[in-house]
């Protein structure tokens, strides 16, 4: 169980890092307006990462019974 949690935390860290990197790349591409298709693909990837991050975060937080 602890190894699984560590694995999820490691994956979460990787996804957050990639998400931040995409922010930088997207902002640079938006300034240049050269490749709109590439920009759309990067934005879709960023949204997918956001969904994966949210899913991982929800599985890392223990259920609290009220």
Image: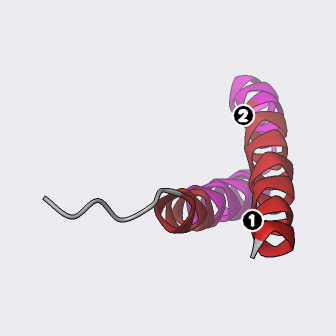
> Residue 51's x, y, as percent?
52, 64
Quarter of the picture containing the N terminus is bottom right
Quarter of the picture containing the C terminus is bottom left
Within the image, what quadrant is residue 29 found in?
Answer: top right
Nearer to me, 3 or 14: 3
Mark 2, secondary structure of its residue: helix
- Is the magenta region chiefly helix, strand or loop? helix
- Look at 53% across and 68% down and name the residue there: 59
Estimate how packed mark 1 is, as few (under 14), some (14 to 19) or many (20 or more) residues with alpha carbons within 10 Å. few
- Using the image, tell me which numbered label, if any, was put on residue 23: 2
Which residues, given as a range, are shown in magenta?
A: 24-50
- Using the image, tell me which numbered label, if any, was put on residue 5: 1
Mark 1, secondary structure of its residue: helix
The residue sitting at the left extreme is 66
Magenta stretch: includes residue 34: yes
Q: Is residue 50 above or below residue 29?
A: below
> Residue 43's x, y, as percent?
63, 54
């Amino acid at each position: 169980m602890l190894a699984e949690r560590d694995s999820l935390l490691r994956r979460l860290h990787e996804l957050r890092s990639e998400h931040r990197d995409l922010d930088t790349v997207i902002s640079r591409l938006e300034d240049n307006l050269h490749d709109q298709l590439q920009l759309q693909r990067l934005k879709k990837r960023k949204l997918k990462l956001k969904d994966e991050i949210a899913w991982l975060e929800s599985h890392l937080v223990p259920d609290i019974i009220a």
